[in-house]
Amino acid sequence: DEAGRLEIFKVHTRKRPLQKGVKLADYLKDTDGCTGAEIEAVCNRAAILAIREFSKTGKDQSAFVIKPSHFSHAVLDVRANTSHTSNL
Protein backbone atom coordinates (compact mmCIF):
# COMPACT_ATOMS: atom_id res chain seq x y z
CA ASP A 1 0.00 0.00 0.00
CA GLU A 2 1.05 3.62 -0.42
CA ALA A 3 1.72 4.25 3.26
CA GLY A 4 4.02 1.24 3.40
CA ARG A 5 5.90 2.25 0.25
CA LEU A 6 6.32 5.80 1.57
CA GLU A 7 7.84 4.42 4.78
CA ILE A 8 10.25 2.31 2.73
CA PHE A 9 11.29 5.40 0.76
CA LYS A 10 11.79 7.29 4.02
CA VAL A 11 13.95 4.52 5.49
CA HIS A 12 16.19 4.40 2.43
CA THR A 13 16.55 8.17 2.07
CA ARG A 14 16.79 9.06 5.76
CA LYS A 15 20.51 9.83 5.77
CA ARG A 16 20.69 11.14 2.22
CA PRO A 17 20.70 14.82 1.25
CA LEU A 18 17.48 15.38 -0.67
CA GLN A 19 17.00 18.64 -2.49
CA LYS A 20 14.19 20.80 -1.18
CA GLY A 21 11.22 19.97 -3.31
CA VAL A 22 11.80 16.22 -3.41
CA LYS A 23 8.43 14.72 -2.53
CA LEU A 24 8.78 11.00 -2.05
CA ALA A 25 5.00 10.65 -2.32
CA ASP A 26 5.35 11.63 -5.99
CA TYR A 27 6.91 8.22 -6.71
CA LEU A 28 4.28 6.07 -4.99
CA LYS A 29 2.12 5.62 -8.08
CA ASP A 30 5.11 4.56 -10.18
CA THR A 31 6.14 1.99 -7.57
CA ASP A 32 2.75 0.38 -7.01
CA GLY A 33 3.27 -3.34 -6.55
CA CYS A 34 7.00 -3.02 -5.94
CA THR A 35 8.87 -4.91 -3.30
CA GLY A 36 10.85 -3.14 -0.63
CA ALA A 37 14.03 -4.23 -2.41
CA GLU A 38 12.89 -2.58 -5.63
CA ILE A 39 12.14 0.67 -3.81
CA GLU A 40 15.55 0.45 -2.15
CA ALA A 41 17.04 -0.01 -5.63
CA VAL A 42 15.27 3.16 -6.81
CA CYS A 43 16.73 5.11 -3.88
CA ASN A 44 20.22 3.71 -4.47
CA ARG A 45 20.05 4.38 -8.20
CA ALA A 46 18.93 7.98 -7.58
CA ALA A 47 21.94 8.46 -5.30
CA ILE A 48 24.30 6.99 -7.90
CA LEU A 49 22.91 9.26 -10.61
CA ALA A 50 23.27 12.26 -8.32
CA ILE A 51 26.88 11.37 -7.48
CA ARG A 52 27.78 10.96 -11.14
CA GLU A 53 26.25 14.31 -12.01
CA PHE A 54 27.78 16.07 -9.01
CA SER A 55 31.27 14.70 -9.59
CA LYS A 56 31.40 16.61 -12.87
CA THR A 57 30.59 19.97 -11.26
CA GLY A 58 33.70 20.50 -9.14
CA LYS A 59 31.54 22.03 -6.41
CA ASP A 60 32.17 21.65 -2.70
CA GLN A 61 30.80 18.43 -1.23
CA SER A 62 28.40 20.37 0.98
CA ALA A 63 26.42 21.33 -2.15
CA PHE A 64 25.58 17.70 -2.99
CA VAL A 65 21.85 16.86 -3.15
CA ILE A 66 19.66 14.22 -4.75
CA LYS A 67 17.15 15.93 -7.03
CA PRO A 68 13.67 14.93 -8.21
CA SER A 69 15.10 14.27 -11.67
CA HIS A 70 17.43 11.65 -10.18
CA PHE A 71 14.45 9.81 -8.68
CA SER A 72 12.49 10.02 -11.94
CA HIS A 73 15.37 8.53 -13.90
CA ALA A 74 15.99 5.93 -11.20
CA VAL A 75 12.40 4.68 -11.42
CA LEU A 76 12.79 4.27 -15.18
CA ASP A 77 16.15 2.51 -14.80
CA VAL A 78 14.89 0.08 -12.19
CA ARG A 79 11.75 -0.56 -14.23
CA ALA A 80 13.89 -1.41 -17.26
CA ASN A 81 15.94 -3.84 -15.18
CA THR A 82 13.03 -5.53 -13.43
CA SER A 83 12.21 -8.66 -15.34
CA HIS A 84 9.51 -10.26 -13.20
CA THR A 85 5.83 -9.46 -12.74
CA SER A 86 6.31 -6.35 -10.60
CA ASN A 87 4.39 -3.26 -11.71
CA LEU A 88 7.41 -0.99 -11.36
Image (cartoon, helix red, strand yellow):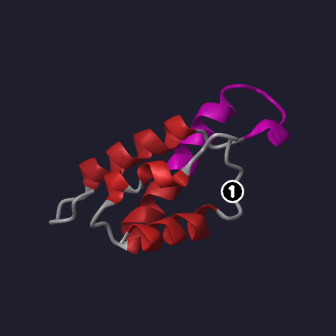
Q: In percent of the image, x 80 and y 29: which residue is there? A: 59
Pointer 1 residue: 16
- The quadrant holding residue 38 is bottom left
Per the image, is 24 magenta?
A: no
Q: Which residues are magenta?
A: 46-64
- Counting from the top left corner in percent of width and height, residue 42 is at 44, 56
Image x and y of residue 36, in percent: 41, 73
Residue at 52%, 64% (x, y): give it. Answer: 9
50 is higher (above) or lower (below) than 39:
above
Tell me the residue at 56%/48% (across/down).
Answer: 23
Give, as a three-letter code, the residue at label 1.
Arg
**Residue 32 place in picture, x, y as percent:** 30, 61
In the shown orientation, is residue 70 left or right of residue 22? left
> For the view shown, which residue lies furthest in the top direction?
57
Given residues 11 and 80, the one toward you in this image is 11
Q: Magenta stretch: dominant SS?
A: helix
Which percent across, then down, holds residue 88? 27, 56
User: Is 52 drawn above or below residue 57 in the view shown?
Assistant: below
**Mark 1: which secondary structure?**
loop
Q: Quadrant of residue 72?
A: top left
